[in-house]
Image: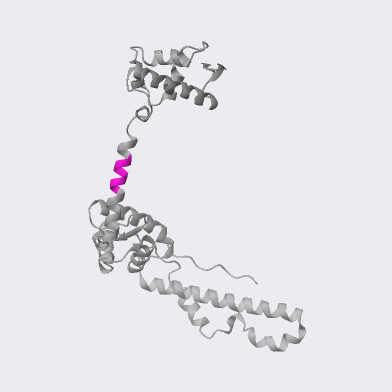
Amino acid sequence: MWLEPPPKPSHNTEQALVELANYYRQLVVYHQQSAAIAASQLAQVETLLNPSLASNLAWQSPPVNSFSNRGELVAELETAPKSLPERQLPHPEELIKSLQSTLAANRGKILRLDYLVLEIAESNFLPPSQYPKLKQQLKQTLEQGERQGLWASIPDSPDCWTLDLKDFPDLVAQSVAKSKSTKKTKKKSSRPAYNRSRLPHAGKMKEYETLTAAISQCLREHAPRTMDAHQIMDWIYPGGLSEKVRNKAYQAISDGLNKGCSRKHWERAEIGWYYWQE
């Protein structure tokens, strides 16, 4: 025995509560018929498995047409609309008002985005099929509203919102401390890499952010010639260095050559001598 699939909601643009009621009446009929068919088939299978159960199971298998109100429902559905109109998402202005109202009613609380979706969907009679679109639109509206100072997101808590972050002093202090730490880190990381090495900020080092990049360029320009730390230092600092700074620069370049060779940036011809290898 085969049963028609359940009816689907309409895709029209107008909404009517009467049609909504008719839609659910169709679902009632469908599930009543499904239950009756399943009960009948279950009784048949269990009877085959154990014939002695036949008399006990007979009462559990009401016929499909045994529901007293089925005829009335079918007659009413024949004249009812066959589909349910689809509700449109609220306009951005309506969403802002709904969000402000919901957050204000829950002042001092942290509300997740999923909770806001359910609240606004229920107040606008939106079906579950509209939840994904509503969630996306709500997230965009929340982010825009935060930039306008209408509400606030919760630090380190994605998709969590509240009316005013000042209601949570601990979170405000945490947010300020994190902001200062982030600015300090950015300021520190913005300095060129060679400022953290032993190399002076002069000569061709002005053109490169790392010692590895400078050595690579030097060896590449002089390939296939082999070079040592003294020659590379003279290339990086064509104007020369003072004796005190020169010793530190030489040691840094020598160490850089050795480490870069182990990482396959260039090749070692012999101890202390290196060449560029494409």
- The stretch of residues the image draws in magenta is 179-185
Viewer can see residue 91: no
The foreground one among 251 and 16 is 251
Q: Can residue 101 be found in the magenta stretch? A: no
Answer with the quarter of the image where residue 194 lies: top left
Q: How many marks?
A: 0
Q: Quadrant of the N terminus?
A: bottom right
What residue lies at 26% left-to-right and 69% top-to-bottom? 105
Q: Can residue 184 be found in the magenta stretch? A: yes
Viewer can see residue 33: yes
Dominant SS in magenta = helix
Q: Position of residue 114 (x, y in %)?
A: 39, 62
Q: Position of residue 192 (x, y in %)?
A: 34, 29
Answer with the quarter of the image where residue 195 lies: top left
Q: Position of residue 228 (x, y in %)?
A: 48, 14
Residue 36 versus residue 184 in the image, above or below:
below
What residue lies at 63% left-to-right and 76% top-to-bottom? 38
